[in-house]
Image: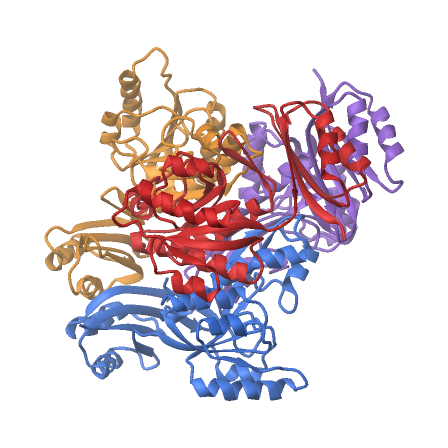
Chain colours: A orange, B red, C purple, D blue
Amino acid sequence: MQEQYILRIDCPDEKGLVHKITGVLYHNDLNVIRTDEFVDKEKSHFFMRTEFAGSTDEKKIISGLIGILPTDATICLNKVRKKNIVILATKEHHCLGDLLIRHHFNELNANILAIISNHQILQSLTEKFEIPFHFISHENKTREAHEIEILDTIELYQPEFLVLAKYMRVLTATFSAQFSNNIINIHHSFLPAFIGANPYRQAYERGVKIIGATAHFVNENLDEGPIIAQSIIPVDHTENANDMARLGKDVEKIVLAKALKLVFEDRIFIRENKTVIFE
Amino acid sequence: MQEQYILRIDCPDEKGLVHKITGVLYHNDLNVIRTDEFVDKEKSHFFMRTEFAGSTDEKKIISGLIGILPTDATICLNKVRKKNIVILATKEHHCLGDLLIRHHFNELNANILAIISNHQILQSLTEKFEIPFHFISHENKTREAHEIEILDTIELYQPEFLVLAKYMRVLTATFSAQFSNNIINIHHSFLPAFIGANPYRQAYERGVKIIGATAHFVNENLDEGPIIAQSIIPVDHTENANDMARLGKDVEKIVLAKALKLVFEDRIFIRENKTVIFE
Amino acid sequence: MQEQYILRIDCPDEKGLVHKITGVLYHNDLNVIRTDEFVDKEKSHFFMRTEFAGSTDEKKIISGLIGILPTDATICLNKVRKKNIVILATKEHHCLGDLLIRHHFNELNANILAIISNHQILQSLTEKFEIPFHFISHENKTREAHEIEILDTIELYQPEFLVLAKYMRVLTATFSAQFSNNIINIHHSFLPAFIGANPYRQAYERGVKIIGATAHFVNENLDEGPIIAQSIIPVDHTENANDMARLGKDVEKIVLAKALKLVFEDRIFIRENKTVIFE
Amino acid sequence: MQEQYILRIDCPDEKGLVHKITGVLYHNDLNVIRTDEFVDKEKSHFFMRTEFAGSTDEKKIISGLIGILPTDATICLNKVRKKNIVILATKEHHCLGDLLIRHHFNELNANILAIISNHQILQSLTEKFEIPFHFISHENKTREAHEIEILDTIELYQPEFLVLAKYMRVLTATFSAQFSNNIINIHHSFLPAFIGANPYRQAYERGVKIIGATAHFVNENLDEGPIIAQSIIPVDHTENANDMARLGKDVEKIVLAKALKLVFEDRIFIRENKTVIFE
């Protein structure tokens, strides 16, 4: 049985990169399963993702690549395996429920190590699926004190990614910075429209005819991290803000699940606050 | 041959409105073709649109309705006929071309009386379809002086609606106020995202995964009038701002045409900067 | 606290129907919450759905309506309440899981009385949510014998609707006839394309660029009952039949849930194998 | 100024193909603008499309590629230039009008050499754009005799592609075979649903909730050639067959234009009645 790998390379563009990179793989006798590449012409920057299989020495491949790539190239070589994640949620169950079902049937490409919530509402759902649930109330605490408690709990699990599955507390820049671009959030609007609180109320007040949801990486600027996936549904005058919120849930959960699949399969490059995604 | 009419009523909601209104139509022996109604529960406001046919005295219907409606009701009774319009454009041909073809084959529900543009690029296209074309350059003129020239030309035609088919000059509040809610614009973004100049460049910079177009009425606040129709297309990292602009054109022309159909068929109520539309 | 009702009327079209029907409601002092009507011009058939509230004598309303409607009108007056349902499933969890989560959080507008399956795979999931699970194997049984066992189990629960949540056995016409138009199925294709077995394989072989799912009522003709809701997702050459099946799951579960909402809220008329739906 | 080229290669998959192919380009000192590749795992078949620029000897590249590719590889090397096309139409103007506007403004990537129609309705529109129009009536002729007249006219122009822009006559297998996979048709349904005549009437009768359009290559089996692009719009009970036909027009013209762009930019491989498309 051969190991499977995903290789992601990005670097300033130059002639012959594909030829040279595939040469390293070819001469290591690896089975390339799929290759995608993209050159951002405006920035003259090269991106390439390759899935391959083989019995190989990872160090040898990396050193072969270093030998032929520009010195400022980023090389990321991962064995294919499930990612370890912790999920933060608040009161709404639709995203968490969807993830728990997928996880239970082994479709999430991740191990959910724990759920942390500032409310207890989702505890019984979580425990049906035998996942640890940590209730960490924010009441009577400063934002910083609350986050320190959360961080202490996260530390127990050493996750690679945090997933905000409708976690409705604003994170401090300090918190976000610790996991920069390893936090994935689902925002209940078609970003960058309706940044901030109550986007469905904002959408209703503005009288838009389409609402949406946006899954994105979280960085220090709230709601302004790199966008991973977006989707929309049409609405009309018959829907008030509550109706939009209800309709939006189905979009939110599907967009979040789609984004997580892309993240966990190492399909995404982040560069200058934007994503390059090989679906 | 009977005349066809469209009746639009909106007023504070109260019990029995549908019964009373349909009673007036029934007792005038009119043939109701279609009725739509909607009650905005938050504002407790009633909207009703009825298409009917009959040989009738319009005044008699109106006075019958006044008799049974709240005193602050708005009653709008129109014979079904084509609207008279003037189109403003700049350099891009996709929306204008689409409207000219529809108009030529009698599918626009409007008479295009003239095209006004601040460039000459679209003149030969327009004249193929035997529509008057007025070139009114904005160069070396204040915005106000330019608009006065445009207004003088518009006045020759006495249109009921102005259509901004990718007219790329910002209108003053003075100009807009004269035609308030009788100007329809196509904005090349998914409003309220990317208000202002170069929305495709903004969309590209933000790295969105969906772009869109918005047809809306123009009032004194640029890009902030009541939204009529929106549509979207997916994009990804391979599209730069120019690609998005090119892809967006097909969305823009279809959304504008759809919005105009709704306007010209008297399907829209405007209230508190939002639209109620019975498609 | 007033009771809420939903009234559905359909009958041959004639002048004054809306006026007369709303008159009955008005004179019974009922609070109309929402009214929708539609006239099928080709068939000259009238459809009307009204939500209202009030303390009333149902018989008095029905008899008032009978007095003013054509003799062949269909009148259906339901108190607003949850429907009782039984779900049939096989091995796939995505639709059942989605419905169980919605049900658990009181969002389904129905009581799930039991799950019946010809496999045991979904038993542990179901039991997490404390719903009875009946495993009724089809092995070594004729189709008829298997269905009789299922019918015996269904009879214990007296459900108003059967939901086929990816139940992969073909139902006999005899079975379907017993619940005609009270069975809702989710078909994993964009009907009427790819009727029958393995629609994703068929879609892959045909090289379509869009796949879909269809929720429909089941009658005697398999896959040919009245369509309730459809939705689609784009695919391309990179997706094989398995990929399409995986992608299709998210569409299937959302379309089924949407259709069930419409059914359980009494929003649907069925006539001549088609649906009229007031969303 | 360098020439631009598009190279398309497909062949049985084997190790190292990308490395070897890119090697040929690299050693000829060509500027690769973009490369896409895809391996069909089920058929073990490799597809690669490369855009490059350079001053080069085409024969040398081809012979270099032959040297490293399997013997049964298909190699297609095109200079980037506009394709020559003839359009066939009948009475409907929406697709033809859209193509004429795009052509007039140099956005079609093709030279429209002539329009051929079995009706005269579109003659004046065509002639506005100074394109030759050939009226070839089908009346009182056998299908074969009519096609021979059309073929004689087509021969005058020696087009590379025929575009059926709502040409409503069924082509014989003999005719189609002469241009096999060089004819592009727009079919007014979501194929394979509603093959044959009156698809909107069929869709209406079936009560579908979504309608669509399909652009495809034409081969000997009517409506069964390789699909290029599809798109859809939602409909409901309020739309009759005529309404669907009207709504469908906007989808048809956009899908046809999109498909033509893909064809004219050499983005498509056809294999076993399916398309591999690098958008």
Residue B211 in picture, x, y percent from top left? 39, 47
Front-most of residues D22 and C146 = D22
Q: Is residue B153 visible?
A: yes
Q: Residue at x 53, y 59 (%)?
A: B102
Q: Is residue B152 left or right of residue C68?
A: left
Q: Residue at x 51, y 47 (%)?
A: B159
Front-most of residues D11 and B189 = B189
The quadrant of the image that shows the N terminus of chain D is bottom left
Residue D268 in picture, x, y percent from top left? 39, 69
Residue C120 in picture, x, y percent from top left? 59, 42
* Res C78 → quadrant: top right
The quadrant of the image that shows the C terminus of chain D is bottom left
Q: Is residue C241 visible?
A: no
Front-most of residues D128 and A121 = D128
Vertical position of residue D238 compared to residue D166: above or below: above
Vertical position of residue C251 compared to residue D263: above or below: above
Vertical position of residue D159 compared to residue B76: above or below: below
